[in-house]
Amino acid sequence: MEEEMGMTNKQFQGFIRLILRIVNNALEKNPDNKDIKELQDILNDMLEDK
């Protein structure tokens, strides 16, 4: 099993998805926040590479 930062790939993906859920909620409250949009893009890119 491949590990990143002491967790399996599946755990890592779950962690990123959890953060994305929080980021998406923040964007619903403030859709014009460019920093949150940038973070969302970075997290989505991380999932696509897995």
Image (cartoon, rainbow, N blue to C red):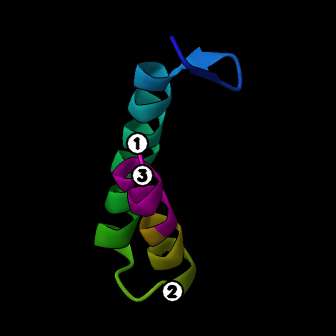
Predominant secondary structure, magenta span? helix
Image-based side of 30 in relation to 9, left or right: left
Q: Amino acid at mark 3?
A: Asp
As drawn, the label of residue 28 is: none
The mark found on residue 49 in the picture is 3
Left/right of residue 7 with respect to residue 11 in the rendered view: right
User: Between marks 1 and 2, how big is the CA–CA gap?
Assistant: 25 Å
- Which residue is situated farthest in the right direction here? 5
Position of 5 with respect to 7 (left or right) is right
Q: How far from the left and from the top, in percent, is residue 3?
A: 61, 19
* Residue 44 forms part of the magenta stretch: yes
Q: Are discs 1 and 3 less than 8 Å apart at CB?
A: yes
What is the C-alpha distance between the residues marked 3 and 2?
23 Å
As drawn, the label of residue 34 is: 2
Please give the name of the residue rendered at 71% of the width and 26% of the height, measured from the top-left corner.
5
Q: Amino acid at mark 1?
A: Lys
Q: Residues within 10 Å of mark 1 (few under 14, many from 20)?
A: few
As drawn, 46 above or below 33: above
Q: Secondary structure at mark 2?
A: helix
